[in-house]
Structure formats: C-alpha cells, structure tokens
C-alpha cells in the first residue's frame, strides 16, 4: 500500500473526513530528513499488512503551505506520525521506529477506532 499524498488543500478530505470511516495514519515528514527516509518503508510495509478497508496511510511533505498543517498539530520534528480517529488525533509518535513499534501503534489505534 502506497501512502496517499496529502496537501494543505486536501487534508480535510483525505485525513479528517476519511478518519470517520477508517483509521488514518498520517506521516508528516521532510524530504531532507534521514529518519523520515528510514521510517517511510517501514510504515508502508506494516500498514500493508492490514485490511485496506480499515486503515489508510497518508503522507504530508512539510514544506510551503503544508507547514500550516504541521503547525496546526504542533509538530516539533520530523518524522511525526499521527493517528486520526473520527476526525481527531488519537495518538502520535516521533522519529523512526521499529516495525514492531509501528504495529503496536496501529493495533492500539484500531482498538480506539472500534470502540468509538
């Protein structure tokens, strides 16, 4: 599963609105960021292990107008990964992580999604 590219103009539709139907995992990264380059294939692989009807991976490149989204969510560093459930942030993590960490993050947030 490849991430859906999100921008300032598509954020509300592709992340917020979509998170009412499925868990949306948003990767906020920068093209110059080495940990971002390490995390991206891990996120893509782990998310692809789940049913595409229950989870979506989105990517926001933190540049230009997209920085308004990073500011809205008080992003302090890259990469920052935020899980969205029912239009709101349910959890986040920073920096590159292991596949097992990412899997645990997704499982926890899928449980939150199912309970609401």
Image (cartoon, grey):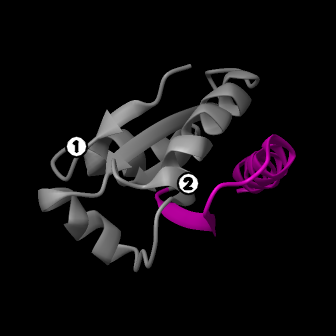
Where is residue 106 drawn, in percent x and y? 74, 47
For this rendering, which residue is in front, 100 or 37?
37
Which label number is shown at residue 68? none
Q: Is residue 53 above or below residue 19?
A: above
For this rendering, which residue is in front, 60 or 33?
33
Queried whether the magenta region covers residue 106, the answer comes back as yes
Which label number is shown at residue 35? 2
Q: Earlier in the sequence, mark 1 or mark 2?
A: 1
What residue is rendered at 75% in x and 48% in y?
A: 102
Instruction: Give the structural element (helix, strand or loop) at label 2.
Output: helix
What distance separates the C-alpha of mark 1 from that of mark 2?
Answer: 25 Å
Queried whether the magenta region covers residue 47, the answer comes back as no
| Whether residue 58 can be seen here | yes
Where is residue 101 drawn, in percent x and y? 82, 52
Location of residue 116 (image quadrant): bottom right
Q: Is residue 65 above or below residue 19?
A: below
**Callout 2: 10 Å neighbours few (<14), some, many (20+)?**
some
Specify the segment rendered in magenta.
87-116
Where is residue 74 drawn, in percent x and y? 40, 80
Q: In the picture provided, is 101 more to the left or to the right than 82?
A: right
Where is residue 108 drawn, in percent x and y? 81, 54
**On the image, numbered disc 1 is attached to which residue?**
10
Please name which of the two marks, 1 or 2, marks the residue nearer to the observer.
2
Location of residue 58 (image quadrant): top left
């Amino acid at each position: 599963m490849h991430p859906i590219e999100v921008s300032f103009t598509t954020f509300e539709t592709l992340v917020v609105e979509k998170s009412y139907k499925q868990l949306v995992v948003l990767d906020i990264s920068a093209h110059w960021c080495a940990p971002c380059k390490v995390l991206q294939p891990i996120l893509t692989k782990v998310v692809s292990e789940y049913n595409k009807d229950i989870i979506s991976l989105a990517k926001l490149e933190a540049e230009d107008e997209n920085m308004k989204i990073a500011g809205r969510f008080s992003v302090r560093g890259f990469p920052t990964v935020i899980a969205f459930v029912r239009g709101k942030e349910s959890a986040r993590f920073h920096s590159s992580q292991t596949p097992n960490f990412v899997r645990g993050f997704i499982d926890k947030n899928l449980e939150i999604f199912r309970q609401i």
